[in-house]
Amino acid sequence: MADPLLSVERAGEILLEHAPQVSDTETMALADANRRVLCEDIASRITQPPFAASAMDGYAVRAGDIGPEGAELQVIGEVAAGAMPDAHVTAGTAMRIFTGAPLPQGADSVVIQENTEKRGDAGVFFKTAATVGDNIRYAGQDFAAGDILLSRGRTLDARALSLAAAGGHAVLPVFRRPRVAVLATGNELVPPGTLPGPGQISASGSVAIAALARDNGADVIDLGIAGDSEAAIRGAVEKAVEAKADILVTIGGASVGDHDLIRPTLAAMGMELDFWKIAMRPGKPLMVGRLGEMRVLGLPGNPVSSFVCALLFAEPLIRHVGHFPPRNRETTAIAASALADNGPRQHYMRGRFDCEGRVEMFERQDSSLQATLAEADCLIVRPPHAKAVEAGETVRIVNLG
Ligand SMILES: Nc1nc2c(c(=O)[nH]1)N[C@H]1C(S)=C(S)[C@@H](COP(=O)(O)OP(=O)(O)OC[C@H]3O[C@@H](n4cnc5c(N)ncnc54)[C@H](O)[C@@H]3O)O[C@H]1N2
Ligand code: MOO
């Protein structure tokens, strides 16, 4: 019989199909622009290097003056970085020059000082032949004014920011960060740090989702904890709408119990449902919909389920909305021990690498166990109906690092 549940792959496609990308932009100082995405091509305002400069400490010479047998030349002055030469190099003369200094007119080569010997007051003997262009950085050899240095869509990092600075920019136009609202739901939840009373547990899920969202370039709106009532959930969702969240991530209340009110409440508020329940374990009750422009991701409450769903769905969604390039976490590894055959849902099993780099699964995989999640290096992916695997065979994994 065909499995009626949506596949993980198809769910991922549907998720991105209706997710509008951020169009608002802002101007950021270079110091604040790291990890942001450029919204325009950036052309250089200047030519780099702006002038022919020496790449070494030594002497600016005319290469033709020094043959294979060497030559003695008269030093007529010196030029350091930041100064301009006050003389021309003519036949039989040289000028002392330092790294970064402009090349004097007439010179066409720089000889490093290690290949010279001082002779008398103003004489220097050049021991080896010089070639035109030796140790010279010519004007514009890096880039010229008007060249496109960085393209729209580039995620800014240390190298890109340095290039922008070299090109004469102090600020850059970037897309605003995607706004992700995170809402925990459940009467049993208390904020982290509050000792749980009878029947209560710490709300850990939103901490994980907020950190993951920030890792992926989002601004997080923490909506706190809503109790299991339609009014409480509605109030929190309204705050997400007011804050103009691009994405609302809810945790818990996604399943079929009498207190699982996320889907009915959002439906009553006008959410268009894209899907609810997928062929995945943990994470079967995942829900995806749209409330106006806001993408809604309803994660199951078990902390491992909410984290795995966030990694597989919230991360790509945030990256897409924020114009960040997709992050491919999937690769393969050698199984350290045998794995049983799999049921109808794609199973993401916590695993860790052994000292030989092979992957072994944790024995206990219950979706409430957070200690093994924190210890895990990867999730071993077991596709629906996958056959049993022997030790030494290759398996798909999702890297958690
Ligand atoms: N009859 C059925 N029952 C359940 C099914 C099902 O198909 N039929 N699915 C199970 C699966 S799978 C999951 S996963 C859970 C998910 O259900 P909910 O999304 O409704 O989650 P809750 O019931 O609200 O919570 C489950 C569990 O997780 C704890 N929780 C909730 N929020 C947080 C949080 N922010 N931080 C830490 N822990 C949290 C909550 O206390 C519960 O212990 O449903 C199964 N049931
Ligand atoms: O799928 Mo639930 O998400 O197993 O714990």
Image (cartoon, rainbow, N blue to C red):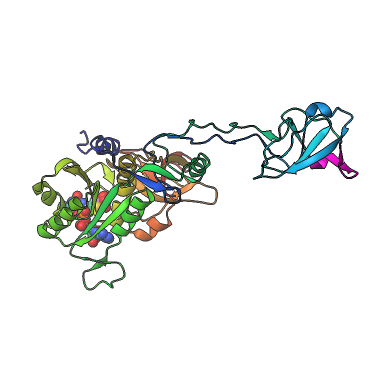
Q: Main secondary structure of the magenta part?
A: strand
Q: Nearer the viewer, residue 108 or 303?
A: 108
Where is residue 101? Give x, y as percent: 68, 41
**Residue occupying image coordinates x 21% and y 33%:** 2
Q: Nearer the viewer, residue 276 or 145?
A: 145
In the image, is 378 to the left or to the right of 83? Answer: left
Magenta range: 112-126
Give above or below for 190 relative to 388: below
Quadrant of ligand 1: it is bottom left
**Residue occupying image coordinates x 77% and y 33%:** 89
In the image, is 48 to the left or to the right of 388? Answer: right
**Residue occupying image coordinates x 69% and y 34%:** 136
Q: Nearer the viewer, residue 66 or 12?
A: 66
Give above or below for 53 relative to 246: above
Where is residue 148? Give x, y as percent: 47, 31
Q: In the rendered structure, does residue 124 fall within the stretch colored magenta?
A: yes
In the image, is 164 to the left or to the right of 66? Answer: left
Where is residue 92? Give x, y as percent: 84, 31
Q: Is residue 196 visible?
A: yes
The quadrant of the rendering that contains the N terminus is top left
**Residue occupying image coordinates x 87% and y 28%:** 68
Q: In the rendered structure, does residue 401 fall within the stretch colored magenta?
A: no
Where is residue 23? Give x, y as percent: 28, 39
> Image quadrant of residue 10?
top left
